[in-house]
Structure formats: structure tokens, C-alpha cells
Amino acid sequence: MHNTQRTEYFTYREIYSEGAEALAAVLEQEREAQLDARLLLEHVCGTSVQTLLLEGDRPVSESDADLYRELIKRRCSREPLAYILGKWDFMGLEFGVSSHVLIPEQDTENLVEEVMRELCDGDRILDLCTGSGCILLSLLHYSNATTGVGTDLSEEAIAAARENAERLGLSDRSEWRTGDLFEAVRPEERFDIIVSNPPYIESGIIAELEPEVRIHEPRMALDGGDDGLDFYRRIIPEAADHLVTGGMLFLEIGYDQADQVSALMKDAGYYEVRAIKDYGGNDRIVCGIKSIHQ
């Protein structure tokens, strides 16, 4: 007589509920716990948002359940969801991400949108501190005949940006260089637009940030020095040497840095300097135009 052993399985709804409950114990917002639990389950099972609503009783294999629990444990340790998934959406596009690059944030979409208002067909763009390449690649994707260069001090970040360019079919319009800001730019190179989301968090504040940022995101992409302005002091004067006359410099800033960064740009000779708010009503971008006198 043969013994038959039933393979254990869980329903889709059961395993989701288990994950959501575990995350709710460590995350501040229950809604975030539910969303992350669902997205991780969809990642493991290759399903969609409709599955939980319409097929909650479908079985989940023991191997998928085990993998899901491992990913839930990682999220419970406050590893960012984007790093667990290995991808993140930005400007309607999907970007590969890892712990070597900042996770693209919605605030930075404001920066891209403001640049797009001034971007013309055929323009050449320089993206400093490019990270995943999300800013430059979004600008190239939503424009015609534009080209660009992305620079970053991290070789791993440049590799990630190059992979994203290949995935989006933009390798022929983009170039990726490792170097410290303008060190990767040839002296004679000029651009119509220079854009950057540089490190701008004060060194002393980083220890107070959420664990997802403090522990997991690359510190070199966060730390802006004692007052958070170190990179602006370098970028603003040097950018003028690589902009065409009438070219524009766009910088993402911290919510309380508009006055200081605007003053740096005005002192360097840029004109029509202005601060622009994000969707939350906070100052997020400072931009200005290179004058003929610079």
C-alpha cells in the first residue's frame, strides 16, 4: 500500500494576508504594508493587481510561498521595495535599480517635467550624478533627436544607467561616463541643458532618516556636506563653462534650500533664476539661464 502525501499549498489570498500582516507590524502605514505585500506577491507569481480581487482562491505553490516569505522578511528588515523587486517606475517608464543607485522618486519627476518645458528637438543634455539614468533617459524618451551624457562617480551606477539605456532602446542617443561631476566632460564640450539631482542632505541629518534610506541607499548619493550645499557650490560655477550661451541649468534641491541655491546661481551670473515647487508645495527645483557675460 502506497502512502500519498498531499503537497501543501496556500491560496493567493491567504499568502497575501500573511505577508500584509507581517509588514503591518513593522511599517508605519497599514496601506503601505498592504501595497508592498501585494506587489511582492505579484512579483513572485507573475500576476497582476486583478488577481487578488478576482482569483483570491487560486493556489500558490509551496516554492512560491517560500520565496514570497523570504522577500517579505527582506522588506520587514526595511530593505526598500524597489531594491527587492530590482526595478521601479519613473515617468511612466521602468528602470532597473539596485543598492548602488538612488531609487527614482516622484519629486524628481517634477524636475524632468520642468526641463521638458524648455527642451527643444535636437538639444544636447548633460546629467550630473546620473545614478540609474532615470532623468536623462526620461528626457530622451519623451523628446525627438535629443542626445545626452550622464556622469557619475560610481562605476556601478554608470553600469546600471547603461543597462537601462539598452532596455529602453536609447543606447544610440546616450553616453555614460564615470567621473566626479565635470571631470568626465571634455573641456570643449557644450550642452543646451545641464540637469542634476545631486546629493543635498546635510551630513548630520542622514542618521535621522528612515532605515530604507539611511541603511540601504548609497550614502555617496545622499551626503551633501555639513550644510547640504557642497555639490551646488561646485556644479553652479563649473556648469557655465559647459553651457551654450542661453543654455539652462536645472537643479533639484532640498525643500529648504531654494534661497541659498538661488543666491549661488545669481552670484555666478545666471539670469532669470527661479525656484519651482513640487506637487507637495515644497521648493524642489532651481533653474537659471547662462548669460553672455559668464
Image: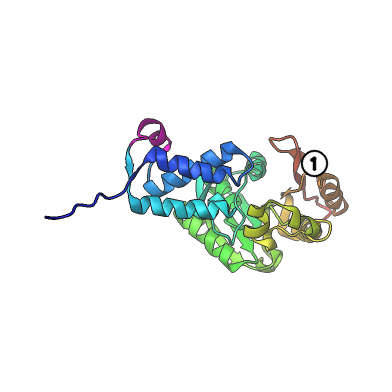
Q: Residue furthest left?
A: 1
Q: Is residue 256 visible?
A: yes
- Residue 204: quarter of image: bottom right
Look at the numbered disc 1 and give the secondary structure of its residue. Answer: strand
Residue for point 72% across, 59% down: 242
Percent of width and height locating residue 59: 32, 42
Q: How many marks?
A: 1
Residue for point 35% across, 54% down: 63
Question: Is 184 one of the magenta-colored residues?
Answer: no
Percent of width and height locating residue 155: 58, 68
Query: Residue under circle 1?
Result: 274
Would you say 239 lies left or right of 259 here?
Answer: left
| Mark 1 surroundings within 10 Å by alpha-carbon count, few (fewer than 14), some (14 through 19), many (20 or more) | some
Percent of width and height locating residue 207: 75, 57
Q: What are the residue bounds of the magenta stretch?
A: 48-57
Please identify the quadrant where the N terminus is shown. bottom left
Would you say 153 lies left or right of 87 here?
Answer: right
Percent of width and height locating residue 243: 72, 55
Instruction: Please determine whether, in this image, residue 11 is positioned above or below residue 61.
Output: above
Q: Is residue 92 visible?
A: no
The chosen color scheme is rainbow
Q: Nearer the viewer, residue 157 or 172?
A: 157
Instruction: Please determine whether, in this image, residue 267 is positioned above or below residue 91.
Output: below
Q: Residue furthest top?
A: 54
Q: Residue furthest front?
A: 1
Q: Amino acid at mark 1?
A: Arg
Magenta region's main secondary structure? helix
Instruction: Please determine whether, in this image, residue 85 is positioned above or below residue 33.
Output: below
Please identify the quadrant where the C terminus is shown. bottom right
Question: Is 52 one of the magenta-colored residues?
Answer: yes
Q: Nearer the viewer, residue 159 or 169?
A: 159
- Residue 132: quarter of image: bottom right
